[in-house]
Amino acid sequence: MSGPARLGVGVIGAHAWAEQAHLPGYHAYERAELVAICDTVPERAEAMARKFGVRKVYTDAQQLIDDPDVQMVDVCTPTDTHLPLSLAAIRAGKHVISEKPLAHDAADAFMAARLADEHGVRTKLGFTFRYSPAIRQIHRWIRDGTLGELFHVHGLEQNSQFLDPTYPLRQVPADADWSALIPSSVVGYGSHLLDLVRWCAGEYRSVIGSMHNYVPQRLVRGYDGPQRIPVEDGTVALAEFASGAQGILQTSYIAVGNYPGVELRVYGSRGAAVARLVEEGGVAETLHFATPDAVEFRKIDLPDTAYPPGTTLHTPWPELYYRNLIRHWVDEILDDRPGECTFFDGAKSQETVNAIVRSHLERRWVDLPTGPERPVTAP
């Protein structure tokens, strides 16, 4: 008699984020089986295989993708490799989850979403913060009418990770023009934030943004000594939504505060909610709620069922959120549930990132298409 269905997982990339978030998520979920791991440095892959009980080790990503025991591919690699590895997995008929951003250009991300539709495979972007229990509660309050008509949505993602110029900056695009401002915070952090806000407030209609470089000289991974590099390390933007709601957005990795530094504030006609995803005092997040007749914000304690089995608010946030993401993702595939946070959603986020960058360069509001909420399969 066979046991319950399990999803065969292959993870490409064995760096810190795989160790802190992806691999613990699969290892902890009984419906997932860690079949294979791949890294260009075999010692890294072998160490992760031993730690998490992965059966097979590869140094060639295509070999992992072609493994018949791998049903789903997890792309946890540097930014420039996300799109080609994801496309290879889709063409091989494998479900695929990719770290963000999927692509630098929204058109490429939309192409990947269409290709997945054509091949009948599922996709997911690693937008970790959608899987915060506090954020998911706010989303439920929006959908069930608890907050009423939305007026204002404020999204912040800010921490001081790169405030220290001796902390090496990661993943500067190989073709970046060092004579001009290089979008960075708005891409790496903004893609998370813009998805989160769109998930709650609906489609963006128009945006206007201001980008700035505050730390002009810093260490850059792969280069010797301090480099003068004009990376955008802080962005603020205003947003208008198709619903009529207004938004304020800020991304920064030089704003003093603890990682991950995400805050979502939602104000509606019937109530307001604030989620702070800031690890403080050993607690991963907090949630507060207020109403017009009780305007003092009160702390909300969520039930145990809001958290993945074996976790609490004291679980480190990377593991807490990613274990939640993994169980939703695996269940979507095995139980044929509606997809959430797909490559299409990643493309919509990148579309908004591109619009904010364009608005800064052209010093004006930029309109966004508010077209179909789901991708249209190419004929």
Image: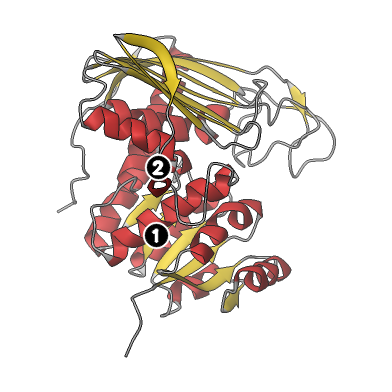
- For image coordinates 64% across by 20% down, the residue present is 255
- Type of amino acid at the residue the image marks with label 1: Val
Q: Position of residue 208 (x, y in %)?
A: 40, 14
359 vs 311, nearest the viewer: 311
Which residue is disc 2 drawn over? 303
Quarter holding residue 191: top left
Residue at image position (63%, 31%) is 280
Q: Which residue was labeled with disc 1?
A: 96
The spot of residue 229 in percent (x, y) is 70, 26
Disc 2 marks a residue whose amino acid type is Pro
Q: Residue 313 placed where, x, y %?
A: 54, 41
At label 1, counting other C-alpha atoms closer than 10 Å, the crowd grade (few under 14, some 14-19, many 20 or more) is many
Residue at 57 percent across and 74 percent down: it is 54
Q: Is residue 240 left or right of residue 275?
A: left
Task: Pick the quarter of the image with the N terminus.
Answer: bottom left
Mark 2 residue element: loop
Is residue 99 in view?
A: no
In this view, the residue in front, 295 or 141, is 295
The quadrant the C terminus occupies is bottom left
Neighbor class of circle 2 (other Cα within 10 Å; few <14, some 14-19, many 20+) is: few
**x, y percent for residue 356:** 43, 21
In the picture shown, does residue 232 fall above or below 285? above
Res 348 seen here:
yes
